Image (spheres, coloured by chain):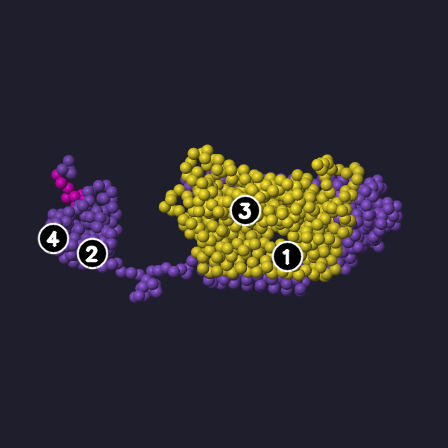
Amino acid sequence: MENKPLYSVAATFNDVNKTLAAVQKINEAGYKNYDVHTPYPVHGLPHAMRLKSSKLGWVTLIFGFSGALFAFLFMYWVNVIDYPLIVGGKPFYQLPAYIPVMFEVTVLSAAVFTVVWMLFIIFKFPNNSHPLIDTEYMKRVSVDRFGISIQANDDLFELNKVKEFFKNLGAEEVFEIYYKIDELKDKPKIFDKKFISFLALTSIVVSAITYFVLNQLLFMSPFNWMHEQFRLNPQKATTVFKDGFGMRNPVEGTVARGYLPYPFKGKPADAEMKLVNPLIPTKQVLELGKEKYLTFCSPCHGNFGFGDSRLRGQFPNPPTLHSDRLRNMKDGGLFHIITEGQNVMPGYASQLTTDERWAIVHYIRVLQRSVNPKESDLR
Amino acid sequence: MRTIDYTIEPPVVEGKPSLSSINEDIARPLETKPTKGWYIAISISLTMLLIGAVSLAITFIEGIGVWGLNQPVGWGFDIVNFVFWVGIGHAGTLISAILFLLRQRWRTSIARFAEAMTIFAVMCAGLFPAIHTGRPWLDGYLLPYPNQHALWVNFTSPLLWDVFAVSTYFTVSLVFWYIGLIPDLATLRDRTTNKIKKVIYSILSLGWRHSTKHWNHYEMAYLILAGFATPLVLSVHTIVSFDFAVSIMPGWHTTIFPPYFVAGAVFSGFAMVQNVLIIIRKVFKIEHIITLDTLEKMNKVMLATGMMVGYAYAMEFFIAWYSGNQIEQFVFLNRALGPYAWSYWIMVSCNVLFTQLFWFRKIRRSIPVMFVIGVLVNVGMWFERFVIVVTSLSRDYLPSSWGMYIPSIYDIGILIGSFGLFFTLIFLFIRTLPVVSIAEVKAVLPNSQPSHGGNH
């Protein structure tokens, strides 16, 4: 138990050839747990220490291939499955265009994981509490001496014997390296007051900064997300025009497309005389008429024009569309009624385009003919 | 005639210094008070950085309309500077990785510095595409991350390849650089007497203890990283050249672009490394570590890559003629004789003509002359990118849509700022970290390796 704080006995040599010879001798003497510390990589030393050559290349291989595969699958998933977007008429899956990103991800993953694996898994770094750190011995070997350290946990280890052994090998200085007892006892505690307050402070600062950046900073000028621009917004005031209105009236006397004024306002007889249905009752026109009739007319006139309202008396029922008067009325008359309205029926000019109104007229003719067919229809 | 025995490799470091004197020489700038020269230098570079910062701030507030960009030249100084700075970075990786794989031992004395330069140059480069987007605070959309718009980036666009190439390049360069620094940081940790420095070095060196068991893996990792950095550095400028070559713009749509860009990148990068090293070795008195032989070898690389670039210039003209494509022919005649002919001839004279002086041994070994040629090469290479970007865009297919590009004062301010950023980082670097790899230089000193039985 006395030996426990002793980590190793270490010796320094001032010549690289001497060091190599000493390593041979140590091997012959049968020591296993020893290490050689040199200020730079010395060729042949790992071989002399009978170290196996590094297997790090396998880590690189595995992570490199995983990177390539991941990049390929990810791009395939994005471009073909999740977000297929045609760019320049090219196919979704195009391997040549995936190569550059696959290559970069391969290199990134292989390089980073090789280093991370070496430092944190093989070397178990960071390890500043190692007994060799901060010793005179370490200060020698990081300048110009070559050091060998035989650990106390070696089976053959005996303090005085090892010291003698080093002296015989021609060592310059011999050190006894001890564990730092206070560091051994001083196990880091999770619920340490300092640690907890450090964590709390960090989290407060980080969340405050995050809140500020995401909710305040990004909405300040110039980070205004294109909200503030020199442009006209609908329903908003502006400084561009003298009257302060952002929305403008059309120039006087102009007519918007599709909004020619109706020339037969209040003149149903003229309309019936002069208006002719411009549409031919094709299948499309009739289907348009049916759709619009069912939407706008059928609530009061009924699905087949019998005046059987679905409104259950909330609105007066209109007369049937199959009366002689309406059957004999010309298309222009029906159009005028739909446009201007009649009695309690409002006009539908604001809800139906001219073509849609004419299509409804055609559809009404279909309904009328289905109730009162001609001789020829029955044949 | 002097005869040279090529069978013996000249020593990397002159005059047989001891191992401990390497520590002293390299750590000296970190442990002494900065000289007056350093203060003057960093004030100049900080002033340049400030000019850039002000120009950038105005750009952010007003929008990129303050730049000289307009139809038809939508890529101006921002892209020119981006390509220029990425190119500067390439020399660092070439020195640290490719020359490592080729067992060029003279690289050891300049590798650390060149790698640092790579990182700083890529930082400068990364700035430009970021601000080129106009609203750099929204640049997060460049990355493919699951977002509330259910929207992904276009993986088949060269501009997105650029995002991956440059960010990978930066990360891998940083990792490579840091791996090289760990043993040196451990050496500094054991050397320093300052408590704060000790804590910083201890954290950064992660508890490295120069163990041979570690060196064994470390050397493997270094080899692997060098092996990856080599194709990476070639891919980065290749992908940058795809930004141009994949388009259908006359003068851009050429297959020679990838090798041409890579050669040009190495060319300009070496010129930059050579320039800065000439100053560093003088100021820090490490002429015996960064030797004249090393500088001469760099000049030879510049001569070789300069001729590759010259070959590319000639080949572009040849292909334009050989293709029989009128528009292509016009573009190149326009480069040499059009409104931007001055920039074309600056490019040719700086990159191809002046570097021919390096055929003479005396000039290769004359520090003032090589410094001037290095500066000219960087000017020439900057203008090469200007010629490629601006002349093609300003006069493409339709004469009715031609236009001229005139950079605004903000463009120039940001360019100055990028140089300020680069040199400020370099000046801070040479005061805080070892500019030469201590462990690597020790390993190539005479008598540092066993004289017999080594396992090479």
Percent coordinates x, y for residue A304 in the rendering: 21, 48
Percent coordinates x, y for residue A273 in the rendering: 11, 50
Is label 2 or label 4 in front? 4
The residue beneath circle 3 is: B380
Q: Chain of mark 4?
A: A
Percent coordinates x, y for residue B30 in the rendering: 70, 57
Query: Chain A appears what colour?
Result: purple
**Snapshot quadrant of residue A43:** top right
| Quadrant housing the C terminus of chain B | top right
Whether B324 is among the magenta residues is no
Is label 3 or label 4 in front? 3
Q: Magenta stretch?
A: A366-375
Q: Chain of mark 3?
A: B
Give the Cα distance between marks 1 and 3.
28 Å
- What label does residue A347 carry, if any? 2
SS under mark 1: helix
Q: Is residue A323 left or right of residue B195?
A: left
Give the Cα distance between marks 3 and 4.
84 Å
Is label 2 or label 1 in front? 1
Both marks 2 and 1 on one chain = no
